[in-house]
Image (spheres, rainbow, N blue to C red):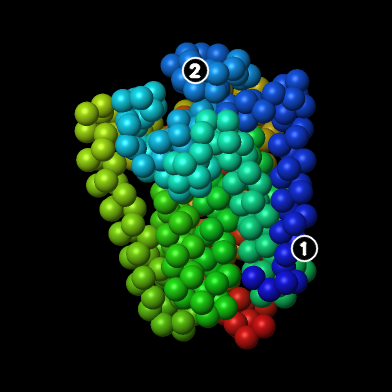
Amino acid sequence: MKSGLWPVGIVGGLIATCYVVLVMSGADWNPTVMLAEGVAAPAQLEYAERTLERPVATRAALGHDGKFFFILANDPWLLDPENHASFLDLPSYRSQRMLYPLLAGGFGLLTAIPTMWGLVVVNVIAAGLGSSATGGIARLLGASRWLGLVFVVSPGVIAELDISGAGTLALALALAGLWLLVKGRSAWAVTALTGAVLARETMILFAAGLCLWAWKARYSFRPALLGVPAAAAIGWRLYIGSRLSSIETTATTAEGLSRNFDLVPLRGVLDASAVWTQNQTKLLWVLCLVAMLALFARRAWRSLAGITWGAWPFALLSIFLSVVVWLEPFDIARAIAPIFIAYPLILFAKVPIEESKSK
């Protein structure tokens, strides 16, 4: 990226670092809190304490995704599933998000403690990369590059930083893919989008949106924008099947999808609403998120910006998310994270992105 975007990335990385420090300070400076281990998840907690050879800070209930990514980062190639992947709740479902733990674990070369820190470091770097990419897109739209900091302060990214989730890296790579595409670096754009999909499978929607936009915006039809990421995801999925066949069944694989998605439109929202009304703070947060979603959908209808085309499929996705996802503002913010980047960008945009290719 141009040197003018690096300051945005550095500040974004510093903000992410400050947030991580804040989380650790609340756990008596115990860095293991970033693994998001839960008191009600004894299998993963025992794995972490045995692997790290030290007590591990816990969070309420089941904890969150970091505990699974730590397991994957210790064996990212699934070479020893009996001693690692078997501690995952849904091995195939969790393993498909391979890029984040692969990088955090040094491609499988790091020991447990450096791997634990790797989860944090990769997310901080991704926060900087995402801020730079967002700043580049903002500048192409005629806005200030510093609008890129919307990336690191968006609720979806903050949520991912909090639990050492893969969403920060996935979103950063997706936005980098858009920026690279507009700058005429198609091969690198495809590479970035492939990484985004391998970090979080739902980013295939972002790639599909960009593929349609590239055709509409007269970049010519670029099937590789969707085809290569899809092929990589399918290839990795086949590899997962060959490695995990001894510890998992088809039923447990399907469960990971069924609990996050609901084929009945809006049923997840309606089922979760009964819980929201019992917690005013949660209700307020959800209403704000829904309002942002509605405002984005209204403005996106008329927008020609590539970021809009990448993000709008997530508005459609939200209709089919299950009650498990809609129940917590924390989770729904992660699920539709691209919208919280796209809306501020198109709100402050001065020119359509396809008219800014030469900038």
Q: What label does residue 324 carry, if any? A: none
Question: Quadrant of residue 156 in the image?
Answer: top right
Residue that mark 2 sits on: 50
- Residue 223's spot in the image, x, y percent? 35, 72
- Residue 214's spot in the image, x, y percent? 46, 75
Count of numbered circles in the view = 2
Q: Is residue 69 left or right of residue 153?
A: left
Rendered-image quadrant of the C terminus: bottom right
- Residue 263's spot in the image, x, y percent? 34, 40
Rendered-image quadrant of the N terminus: bottom right
Between residues 260 and 16, which one lies in front from this camera angle?
16
Q: What label does residue 7 carry, if any? A: 1
- Residue 295's spot in the image, x, y percent? 63, 55
Cα–Cα span, label 1 and label 2:
41 Å
Sort mark 2 into few (<14), some (14-19) or many (20+) by Cα contacts within 10 Å.
Answer: few
Question: Mark 1 belongs to which amino acid?
Answer: Pro
Q: Is residue 56 left or right of residue 85?
A: right
Q: Secondary structure at mark 2?
A: helix
Between residues 206 and 290, which one lies in front from this camera angle?
206
Q: Secondary structure at mark 1?
A: helix
Q: Residue at x 54, y 23 (%)?
A: 52
Sort mark 1 into few (<14), some (14-19) or many (20+) by Cα contacts within 10 Å.
Answer: some
> Which residue is situated farthest in the bottom direction here?
358
Vertical arrangement, residue 340 with respect to residue 255, above or below: below
